Image (tube, rainbow, N blue to C red):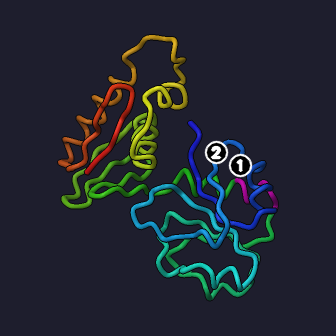
């Protein structure tokens, strides 16, 4: 599966990152397009090159879904709860750090969060464990809110559309059962060829 990432940076850096992170679905934005989206689940990377860049961002409000990469030595601007990469570093090291950030990101959605393969209800602390495929399906759904079943079959389950199988429905049944076990209010709905997730 290709994870989706927001990139906030200037044009030259966005072009470079598009090549460096070709294994991901990238959504590219200029720094001045940044808005704090509290319910936004997609991991985001900010590339800040100078103090003016820091002034554009409201770093106090951004969540742990953001990774900040900067060459500025004075990092007093950085809120300690945020992830931070100090450059210069080798290209391979930056790529590895970004990959680790995306893989280990906690995904929050209403009364649940996912960390690694553990699904927890934040209201009652009940939890269960998901398989890697279940994590990928649920994380994708949370990120997009609505998705095509064919997309999940092809990109997560690696099943061609031409092949008839109930594999996706079986995975969804198990995910729903686990969500019921932890008493979350979140529901996954099927509508013909689409899937939706709602609180």
Crowding at mark 1 (Cα within 10 Å: few <14, some 14-19, many 20+): some
Residue 96 place in picture, x, y as percent: 69, 54
Q: Residue at x 80, y 70 (%)?
A: 88
In this figure, which residue is indicated by the disc labeled 2? 24
In this figure, which residue is indicated by the disc labeled 1? 21
Instruction: Determine the secondary structure under disc 1.
Output: loop
- How many labels sit on residues? 2
**Image: magenta residue range:** 90-95
The quarter of the displayed image where residue 189 is located? top left
Residue 54 place in picture, x, y as percent: 65, 82
Q: Are marks 2 and 1 in contact (CB under 8 Å)?
A: yes
Q: Nearer the viewer, residue 161 or 191?
A: 191
Q: Residue at x 69, y 69 (%)?
A: 47
Q: Residue at x 52, y 70 (%)?
A: 35
The quarter of the displayed image where residue 168 is located? top left
Residue 116 place in picture, x, y as percent: 44, 49
Instruction: Determine the secondary structure under disc 2.
Output: loop
Left or right: 196 in relation to 11: left
Q: Residue at x 21, y 49 (%)?
A: 184
Tell me, yes or no, whether the highlighted magenta stretch contains residue 93.
yes
Left or right: 71 in relation to 106: right
Residues under labels 2 and 1: Cα distance? 6 Å
The quarter of the displayed image where residue 173 is located? top left
């Amino acid at each position: 599966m290709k994870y989706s990432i927001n990139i906030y940076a200037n044009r030259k850096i966005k072009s470079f990152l598009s090549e460096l992170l070709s294994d991901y679905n990238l959504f590219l934005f200029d720094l001045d397009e940044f808005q704090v989206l509290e319910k936004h689940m997609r991991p985001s990377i900010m590339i800040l090159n100078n103090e003016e860049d820091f002034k554009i961002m409201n770093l106090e409000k951004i969540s742990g879904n953001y990774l900040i990469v900067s060459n500025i030595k004075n990092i007093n601007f950085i809120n300690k709860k945020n992830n931070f990469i100090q450059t210069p570093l080798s290209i391979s090291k930056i790529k590895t750090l970004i990959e680790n950030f995306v893989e280990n990101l906690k995904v929050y959605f209403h009364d649940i969060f996912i960390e690694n393969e553990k699904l927890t209800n934040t209201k009652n602390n009940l939890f269960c464990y998901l398989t890697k495929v279940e994590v990928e399906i649920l994380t994708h759904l949370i990120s997009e809110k609505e998705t095509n079943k064919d997309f999940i079959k092809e990109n997560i389950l690696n099943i061609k559309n031409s092949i008839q199988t109930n594999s996706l429905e079986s995975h969804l049944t198990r995910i729903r059962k686990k969500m019921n076990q932890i008493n979350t209010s979140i529901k996954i709905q099927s509508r013909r060829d689409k899937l939706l997730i709602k609180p």
